[in-house]
Image: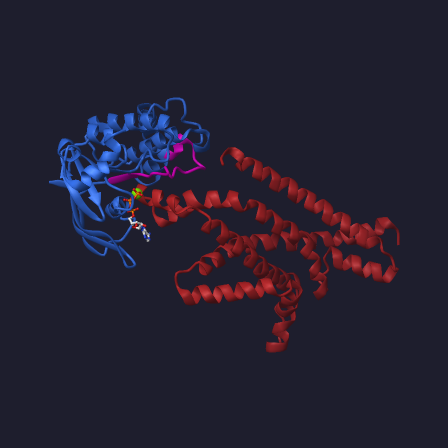
């Protein structure tokens, strides 16, 4: 059973067709990276998968009882809540867990994110990398079966990027399916089970990291060349 | 008349001044929220009507609105709203201030980033929960200075009740000033409003400080 099955997705903004008949599926526990040039429709695809955006045609289907989470590029933490409250508020008020239960889980998650001792701080008191790690803990606290990341590090300085990528990588042993839109090519190659290369609203290339990154397709070479040379 | 008796007589009206002030806040603060929601309604007719009403309430003098509420019913139906003038005064003030508060609330709500709503939606919050737990607390902090401004204005605006001869502090002061041909009651009134607003500033300052724990 696939965790997520998106079939024949089309989406236009006005005249501009952003997604042109895209189909994507994600297996249980699978880690999929989505790469591709700016404007190719990666964010739009994630927003459709998470119902933040409507689709023009096609279907989005999750496994029965599957929950999804989303980590935003801009974190979108709740500024009026401490780190701990950011992580516990939805479990308490949405999932109706007890406060003790939610806090115990949150402490574990924050520790896992390397944020021990920061529980009482407010988002503005944290670095961008720390804020993004709180956001990841917040997403994990709702027990998702599939977690989407939309360029989780592109709002961060290079020094802070590494720490966030490290914690994302460490999530692999949770066996949560992950779909990661990223411009971090080395990271994508390292972590992914499968890589999707999007271009102009279509999937230009899809396969194992080696298949995609070592591809000699013209578009892939042109796009990846920029990164491989670094 | 000695200064003492003047202050005593005007003091009798201060209770009524305070009544206008607190009752107006009591009704206009929540009413403003309702009006803000109507103004932001997706239904274009509702939103346009609300917008028009708000612009009339903000674009005409409160004094005129007070006269309309107090005496209008008499000319139209041959009946007054109530013997007790406090009732039309509070109605007129509440409606007028609700229009101002509505625009402040709307500004605050619309200034929230869409990311806050989206994060809440992904986490499974209902619309009501999103508003009450995520949006409102942040809006409250953001609009507090504008609310303070309106509250300060309201303190001074209570004196407008003299137009319908409601016996609040300023009305009594004006009557004494006329009968005694003295300017002193106006000074007493000035000191009173100033002291009242010093208290308002102090309290609102405390509330703002309390919300300083985040940015
Ligand atoms: N709400 C919107 N209204 C109009 N056009 C939009 C909207 N959202 C996205 N677009 C357009 O759709 C196209 C795809 O955008 P999208 O954000 O999905 O690209 P992306 O692959 O995520 O790019 P990036 O790498 O820069 O984040 C772009 O041309 C963008 O301008
Ligand atoms: Mg994007």
Measured from the top left, where is residue B145 in percent x and y?
A: 58, 45
Residue B87 falls in image quadrant: bottom right
Q: Which residue does the image show at 23% across and 56% down from the upper left?
A: A56
The vertical placement of A149 against B85, above or below, is above
Image side of residue B86 versus residue A31, left or right = right
Query: Can residue B82 be seen?
Result: no
Measured from the top left, where is residue A119 in percent x and y?
A: 40, 26
Quadrant location of the C terminus of chain A? top left
Q: Nearer the viewer, residue A98 or B200?
A: B200
Quadrant location of the N terminus of chain A? top left
The vertical placement of B91 against A62, above or below, is below
* Quadrant of picture, ligand 2: top left
Measured from the top left, where is residue B119 in percent x and y?
A: 35, 42
Residue A28 falls in image quadrant: top left
Query: Can residue B129 be seen?
Result: yes
Is residue A70 shown in magenta? yes
Is residue B207 shown in magenta? no
Extreme-left residue of the structure:
A1
Report the coloring of the rendering: by chain
Colour of chain A in the image: blue
Q: Which residue does the image show at 33% across and 45% down from the upper left?
A: B121
Image side of residue A176 versus residue A80, left or right = left
Residue A142 falls in image quadrant: top left
Image side of residue B7 versus residue A166, left or right = right
Which chain corresponds to the colour red?
Answer: B
The vertical placement of A31 against B64, above or below, is above
Q: Which residue does the image show at 23% across and 48% down from the upper left?
A: A200
Range drawn in magenta? A68-86
Q: Nearer the viewer, residue A46 or A86?
A: A46
Measured from the top left, where is residue A74 in percent x and y?
A: 37, 38
Tally of numbered tags: 0
């Amino acid at each position: 059973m696939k965790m997520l099955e998106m079939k024949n997705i089309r989406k236009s903004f006005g005249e501009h067709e952003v997604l042109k008949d895209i189909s994507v599926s994600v297996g249980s526990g699978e880690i999929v990276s989505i790469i591709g040039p700016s404007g190719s429709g990666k964010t739009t695809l994630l927003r459709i998968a998470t119902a933040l955006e409507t689709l023009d045609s096609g279907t989005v289907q999750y496994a029965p009882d599957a929950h999804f989470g989303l980590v935003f590029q801009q974190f979108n933490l709740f500024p009026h809540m401490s780190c701990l409250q950011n992580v516990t508020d939805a479990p308490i008020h949405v999932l109706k867990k007890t406060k003790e239960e939610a806090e115990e889980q949150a402490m574990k998650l924050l520790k896992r994110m390397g944020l021990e001792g920061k529980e009482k701080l407010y988002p503005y008191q944290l670095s961008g990398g720390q804020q993004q790690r709180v956001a990841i803990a917040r997403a994990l606290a709702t027990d998702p079966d599939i977690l989407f990341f939309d360029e989780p590090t592109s709002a961060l300085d290079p020094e802070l990027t590494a720490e966030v990528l490290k914690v994302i990588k460490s999530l692999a042993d949770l066996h949560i399916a992950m779909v990661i839109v990223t411009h971090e090519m080395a990271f994508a190659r390292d972590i992914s089970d499968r890589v999707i290369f999007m271009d102009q609203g279509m999937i230009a290339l899809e396969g194992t990291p080696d298949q995609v990154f070592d591809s000699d397709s013209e578009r892939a070479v042109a796009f990846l060349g920029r990164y491989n040379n670094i | 008349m000695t200064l003492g008796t003047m202050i005593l007589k005007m003091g009798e009206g201060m209770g009524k001044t305070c009544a206008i002030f607190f009752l107006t806040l009591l009704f206009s603060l929540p009413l403003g929220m309702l009006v803000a929601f109507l103004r932001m309604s997706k239904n274009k007719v509702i939103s346009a009507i609300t917008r028009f009403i708000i612009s009339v309430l903000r674009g005409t003098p409160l004094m005129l609105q007070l006269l309309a509420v107090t005496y209008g019913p008499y000319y139209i139906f041959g009946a007054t709203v109530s013997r007790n003038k406090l009732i039309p005064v509070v109605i007129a003030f509440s409606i007028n201030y609700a229009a101002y508060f509505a625009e402040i609330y709307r500004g605050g709500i619309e200034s929230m980033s869409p990311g806050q709503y989206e994060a809440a939606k992904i986490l499974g919050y209902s619309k009501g929960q999103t508003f009450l737990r995520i949006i409102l607390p942040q809006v409250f902090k953001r609009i507090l200075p504008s609310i303070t401004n309106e509250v300060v204005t309201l303190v001074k605006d209570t004196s407008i009740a003299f137009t319908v001869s409601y016996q609040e502090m300023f009305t009594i002061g004006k009557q004494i000033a006329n009968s005694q041909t003295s300017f002193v009651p106006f000074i007493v009134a000035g000191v009173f409003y100033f002291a009242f607003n010093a208290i308002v500033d102090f309290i609102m300052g405390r509330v703002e400080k309390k919300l300083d724990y985040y940015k």
